Image (spheres, rainbow, N blue to C red):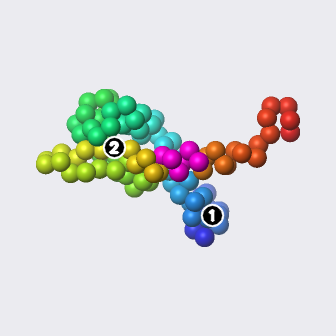
Amino acid sequence: MDTDTLSNKTYNLSHDEARLVQVMKALAHPARMQIVRYLSQNPQCITGDIVDSLPLAQATVSQHLKVLRDAGIIEGTIDGPAVCYCLDYDTVDWLKETVGSLFSGICGEGEC
């Protein structure tokens, strides 16, 4: 079990739960959501392309890319002096499945 401390409380989380928290935290920022959307429409793009698509400085975009990379949502490969980024589809598939199962026991409207 992984332990995550939030607001001075300790939660005993399974590995998948801790991973889900990390991925969802990474996706919780509007700029990172835009980066993920951009990469879903433009696979294998260079950092400069991402910077050009956002109203943020290159250093700020790099920080957001690092958060997404650390969460496993994206991966980057060095291509000469540039880094090409793409979505990590194993993580994307895992996220879809995990979030789906998180809500699988919830009743429909008016059923609970």
Q: Residues within 10 Å of mark 2 (few under 14, many from 20)?
A: many
Q: Main secondary structure of the magenta part?
A: helix
Residue at 51% over, 42% down: 28
Q: Secondary structure at mark 2?
A: strand
What quarter of the picture does the C terminus occupy? top right
Q: Is residue 9 magenta?
A: no
Q: Which residue is mark 1?
A: 13
Q: Is residue 72 visible?
A: yes
38 with respect to 81 (left or right): right
Q: Considering depth in this image, is 96 or 82 the residue closer to the camera?
A: 96
Q: Residues within 10 Å of mark 1 (few under 14, many from 20)?
A: some
Three-letter amino acid code at disc 2? Cys
Relative vertical location of residue 3 with respect to residue 42 in this rendering, above or below: below
Nearer to us: label 2 or label 1:
2
Give me the disc on residue 86: 2
109 with respect to 16 (left or right): right
Residue at 48% over, 46% down: 92
In percent of width and height, residue 45 lies at 27, 38
Q: Secondary structure at mark 1?
A: strand
Q: CA distance from mark 2 to mark 1?
A: 29 Å
Residue at 51% over, 47% down: 93
Three-letter amino acid code at disc 1? Leu
What quarter of the picture does the N terminus occupy? bottom right
Span of residues in magenta: 92-97
In percent of width and height, residue 16 lies at 58, 60
